[in-house]
Image (tube, rainbow, N blue to C red):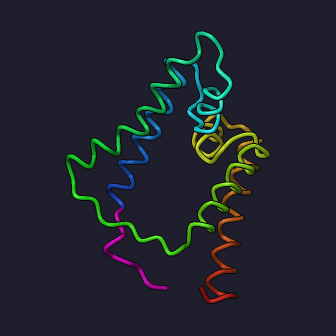
Amino acid sequence: MTVDWNAFTPWSSLAGGALIGIAAAMLALLNGRIAGISGVLGGLLTPVRGDIGWRVAFVAGLLVAPLLYLLLAEVPRAQIDAGYVALVLAGLLVGVGTRYGSGCTSGHGVCGLSRLSPRSLAATASFMGAGFLTVYVTRHLFGV
């Protein structure tokens, strides 16, 4: 195994993780809400009076923050080694998995684990295990 030292960014990764944790904790402590993206977005698809404003602000922040970052820093060109069909299929599978798993990786992995939820522990272990297995199969068995 080799390390891609250009992509090895422990300090910025640590800072990003800390910001995500602080933001999730603040939303839970100050607003009593869980920062699971699928739940936040799902609440916009089935709106309830008085529960829309914070959801719109949350999603707007997800969309605006990267645009603001573009103004401050040069972003490297992303290279995606998959076709549109694979990307659409992957997105649909993630959406279906999110519905069956009663939440997404951010909801279970960040918010659920911090609340010591057994269901979130099982979900996160499943996400991670599936990811490990997928990488092993595609890299070592199929040689992709």
Question: Considering the image in quadrants, where does the C terminus appear?
Answer: bottom right
Residue 5 x, y percent position in the rendering: 33, 76
> Magenta span covers which residues?
1-9
Left or right? Give the position of 128 relative to 72.
right
Q: Is residue 109 magenta?
A: no
Residue in the picture at 47% in, 29% down: 58
Q: Quadrant of residue 66?
A: top left
Q: Residue sitting at 36 percent across and 69 percent down?
A: 8
- Residue 144 in the image: above or below residue 38: below
Q: From the viewer's perspective, is 103 left or right of 12?
A: right
Measuring from the top left, give residue 60's x and y in whole percent.
43, 32
As drawn, which residue projects farthest toward the left? Answer: 72
Residue 105, horizontal then vertical, whole percent: 62, 48
Q: How many marks?
A: 0
Residue placed at 76% from the left, 49% from the top? 122
> Which quadrant of the structure image shows residue 4?
bottom left
Closer-to-camera residue (128/82): 82
The reply to whether the magenta stretch includes residue 2 is yes
**Above or below, 135 relative to 122:** below
In this view, the residue farthest toward the top is 50
**Residue toward you, 28 or 139:** 139
Seen as rendered, the residue at the extreme right is 100
Tell me: residue 117, above or below residue 29: below
**Along the line of sight, which residue is nearer the eye, 114 or 70?**
70
Main SS, magenta residues? loop
Q: Is residue 39 left or right of residue 25?
A: right
Q: Position of residue 89 (x, y in %)?
A: 67, 62
Decide: is 134 above or below 30.
Answer: below
